[in-house]
Image (tube, helix red, strand yellow):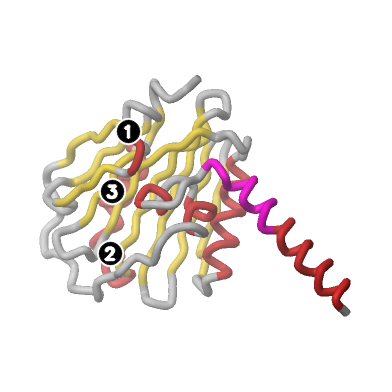
Amino acid sequence: MAAERHRSGRQASLAVALVAALYGWLQPGAATAALIPAAARLFAPPVERSTARDAPSKQPSRYVVYRNQRFGQTVEYPTDLFTESQDLEEGAGRKFVTADGTATLYASGARNDAGWNVRDLARLSESYFADKGAEVTFVRTGDNWYVLSATDDNGRVHYEKGLVTHQGRIVSTLLVEYPAAWKDYFQPILARIVHSFQSGPAEGVG
């Protein structure tokens, strides 16, 4: 019995070590919520969510471009909706939040030392949301991109777009979260944000 317990404990330790090796390049902290969504969230601290409010009455009118020099991702976002922002750790990207915290946007990048492709990343995200009880409504992959949408039990939509670029060395991730009740209002905003999310020259390639 003692030997069996020892063997089970050793197997568990090996499993933990394997997971740590697989995701070891992701560091816990503020940045982990957006680096590689499914993998990063395994280590991310709980995030407080505000209760859903009515959507704003007017569409935003002022968009600006955010560019991350380290990993090269760029995205257009409406400054009259996402009025607050915070840099992520170690130059990974930036988090944008509405004034009341109802909607959130992350644009971030990371070195792809694990060698994941877009199908790997899409499967990781899909598994993550399914394990959390969220309904994954669609997943699509292309040559160097994937998109995924899921709705959780709290009525929040999670939309992700991931890019694998720079000869597979960098992963850029867009993550947008908003109340499902805002769907009609948010659809044109999301379309513009997602379409604008691209990867360009990066200082972090090496």
SS state under label 3: strand
What residue is shown at x 54% (from left), y 56% (from top)?
125
Residue 181's disc number: none
Quarter containing the N terminus: bottom right
Q: Amino acid at mark 2?
A: Asp
Start-end of magenta stretch: 16-25
- Of the numbered discs 1 and 2, the one sitting upstream in the chain is 1
Residue 63 at what x, y percent from top left? 17, 40
Foreground residue among 170 and 11:
11
Foreground residue among 35 and 62:
35
Whether residue 185 sits left or right of residue 205 in the image: it is left
What residue is shown at x 67% (from left), y 52% (from top)?
17
Residue 104 at what x, y percent from top left? 28, 57
Residue 95's disc number: 3
Whether residue 92 sits left or right of residue 114 in the image: it is left
- Of the numbered discs 3 and 1, the one sitting upstream in the chain is 1
Q: Residues within 10 Å of mark 2 (few under 14, many from 20)?
A: few
- Of the numbered discs 2 and 3, the one sitting upstream in the chain is 3
Q: Which residue lies under the disc numbered 1?
A: 74
Q: Main secondary structure of the magenta part?
A: helix
Occupied quadrant, residue 154? bottom left
What residue is shown at x 55% (from left), y 62% (from top)?
128
Q: Residues within 10 Å of mark 1 (few under 14, many from 20)?
A: many
Residue 7 at what x, y percent from top left? 84, 67
Q: Which residue lies under the disc numbered 2?
A: 184
What residue is shown at x 39% (from left), y 21% (from top)?
203
Foreground mark, 1 or 2, reads 1
Foreground mark, 2 or 3, reads 3
SS state under label 1: strand
SS state under label 2: helix
Q: Is residue 76 above or below residue 179?
A: above
Q: Amino acid at mark 3?
A: Lys
